[in-house]
Image (spheres, rainbow, N blue to C red):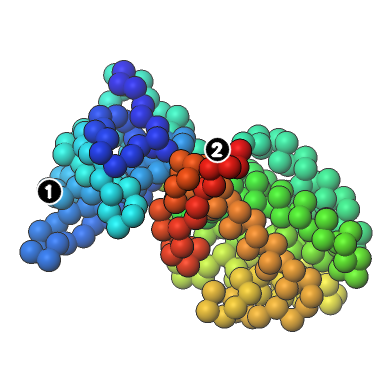
Amino acid sequence: MSQINNVEKLKPGDSVEAFYLIKRSQQGVTTQGKPYMTLYLQDKTGEIEAKLWTVTKEDMEVLKPETLIKVKGDVIDYRGKKQMKIAAFRTAGDEDGLSPKDFVEKAPIDEETLHESIMDYVIKIENGSLQRIVRQILNKYRKEFLSYPAAMTYHHDFVSGLAYHVHFMLRTAESLCDIYPSLNRSLLYSAIILHDVGKVKELTGPVGTTYTTEGNLIGHIVIASEEVARVAEELNIESEEVMLLKHMILSHHGKLEYGSPKQPMLKEAEILHYIDNIDARMMMMDKHLNKADKGQFTERLFPLEGRSLYKPESFE
């Protein structure tokens, strides 16, 4: 069996001959009218964009997400970002002894530990109506909530990324509530736990993650709000807290242009937006800085306004 080359260690100028999992694939046409494919190849250390400039109809049928392939090619620098140019490929067979799960990045905290941590915060939700809603939804989607990524790309895009994201948001919220005691802990904790729960329907799963039809047409924000309303009705809960929780979910992206149906109109909603943003950005920055050498810049990061980050030589 060929050795798996770590994506995070690949650099422009490297030649590659290794197995990878197709995370996403896209078909395209060159300016000359010839078809090509863009593949996002991954292993446990990360992913890399790859181009296959000569493709057949058969190739397009084979090169689908969740497919394991062995590629031969070269890594180049394309506009400040590393990219693989594929010269040849073949799909993995039984004789290679490989499984897609061997190529999927996972959260550094296991599912059971994440579940226990989040449930510790559920206990701290003193408002009975909110706690009942949160418990009901977590019980309903426990498997998906603990295994799904928080996004298809950019931040927490790995197995258990959703629960990992919520875990650190709750820790941040607890500290802020200690500093600013006027914040309503029950509302803030509930909204943090449920703000992205719609991802369990918006995304297809932890391997070869793509958007579902419901995810494309409705989106996780509205899906989560509808789920809260549905569960509240099932539990016969009619109170202002339900409306406030829905508002928290509907406004957590902060601005209309960022996909929020509403802008925050509660201080807890404003804080939720910032906590969400802090954790997502910290994850993205750490992810790319870990790949950079000391004294060097990262590649340009689209979700961070196209900026490159510098990794100081003096920092450990």
Examine the rendered structure and indicate whether residue 200 appears above or below residue 159: below
**Location of mark 1 (residue):** 54
Query: Which amino acid, mark 1?
Result: Thr
Between 211 and 160, the residue placed more toward the observer is: 160
Label 1 neighbour load within 10 Å: few <14, some 14-19, many 20+? few
Between 80 and 228, the residue placed more toward the observer is: 80
Instruction: Give me the C-alpha separation between circle 1 and circle 2.
Output: 33 Å
Examine the rendered structure and indicate whether residue 198 appears above or below residue 57: below
Residue located at (82% from left, 50% from top): 121
Label 2: element kind: loop
Q: Quadrant of residue 245?
A: bottom right
The image position of residue 139, as x and y in percent, is 73, 48
Query: Which amino acid, mark 2?
Result: Lys
The image position of residue 221, as x and y in percent, is 60, 68
Tag count: 2
Quick one: quadrant of the N terminus?
top left
Would residue 228 appear left or right of 299 to someone viewing this image? right
Residue located at (36% from left, 45% from top): 48
Quick one: quadrant of the C terminus?
top right
Between 120 and 72, the residue placed more toward the observer is: 72
